[in-house]
Image (tube, helix red, strand yellow):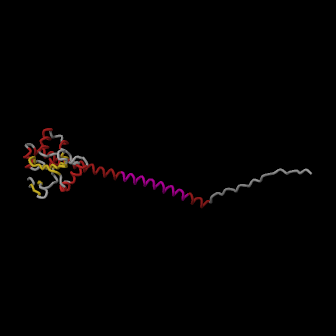
Amino acid sequence: MEAAATVHDDLRTVSHGDDSNAVVRFYWHKVEEKHYMRLNFPGDNKSEWDQPVRPQDKIRFAKQWDLYEKQMSQFGDESLIEELEFLTPPQIEQLKMANVHTIKHLAGLTDTQMNNIGMGMREIVKKAQNWLYDEHHNMEIKRLEKMLGQKDDEISSLQAKLVENQETTQSLIARVEAMEADARTGSPQKAPKKKSVKKTKPTIGLD
C-alpha cells in the first residue's frame, strides 16, 4: 500500500510517508545564477518540485546538500541501478524516468508505484530485494572476517611478546645462577702486578 502524501504548509512540498526515500538533487541554475533543488519520489513521474534552495531545504536534506557542496554524487554511497546485471538498458532508462535511480529505491517500490511504472516490475523489484539481501549478507561476512583478522593479529602479537618475555626470563635466571655459583666458589682474584724498577748505571766522577 502506498504511503499517503502529506503537504507541508511551511515548505510547500509533499512527502510520501517520509523523506528517507526522496530523490533530491541540488544544482546550479545558470540562468538565474542561484542554487536550485529538484525533488521527486520513486515511482512517481508526475510530481516534481523544482525551486530555488531555501535555508530549510539545506536542513531538511542536509546529507544531499553536503554532498552537493563537495561536488560528489548526491546519492552518496548507495548502489545505482546500473549495477544490476539483470536490467536491460531500456529498463534502466524506464526506471530513471520514474525517478528510480538506486537499488534501494527500486527495492522499496510499493504495488501502486510498480503498477505506475509498467508490467514486469514485480519480478524486477523482487530481484532487487534479493540483491540487497545478498549484499548486506556479504558485507556482514566481510565485517566478521575483518574482526577475525584483527583478533589473529592480536593473538600473534601476544604470542611474540610471550616468547620475548620467556627469553628475557631465561636470561635473568642464567645470570642469577651464575652469580650464585660465584658466591659459593669464590671468584678468582688476579695477582697484583709487580712494579718494575728502572735500573740506572753508576756514574764515575773524575777529580
Residue 8 falls in image quadrant: bottom left
| Residue in the picture at 7% in, 46% down | 116
Magenta stretch in the rendered image: 153-177
| Residue in the picture at 40% in, 53% down | 159
Magenta: predominant secondary structure element? Answer: helix
Residue 15 falls in image quadrant: bottom left
Image coordinates for residue 1, horizontal then vertical, percent: 8, 53
Image coordinates for residue 154, horizontal then vertical, percent: 37, 53
| Residue in the picture at 11% in, 45% down | 98
Q: Nearer the viewer, residue 130 or 113?
A: 113
Q: Specify whether 66 is left or right of 112.
A: right
Q: Is residue 165 magenta?
A: yes
Image coordinates for residue 18, horizontal then vertical, percent: 14, 55
Residue sticking out furthest to the right: 207
Q: Is residue 187 magenta?
A: no
Q: Tag count in the figure?
A: 0
Image coordinates for residue 111, horizontal then vertical, percent: 8, 49
| Residue in the picture at 75% in, 53% down | 196
Q: Nearer the viewer, residue 30 or 159?
A: 30
Q: Specify whether 86 is left or right of 166.
A: left
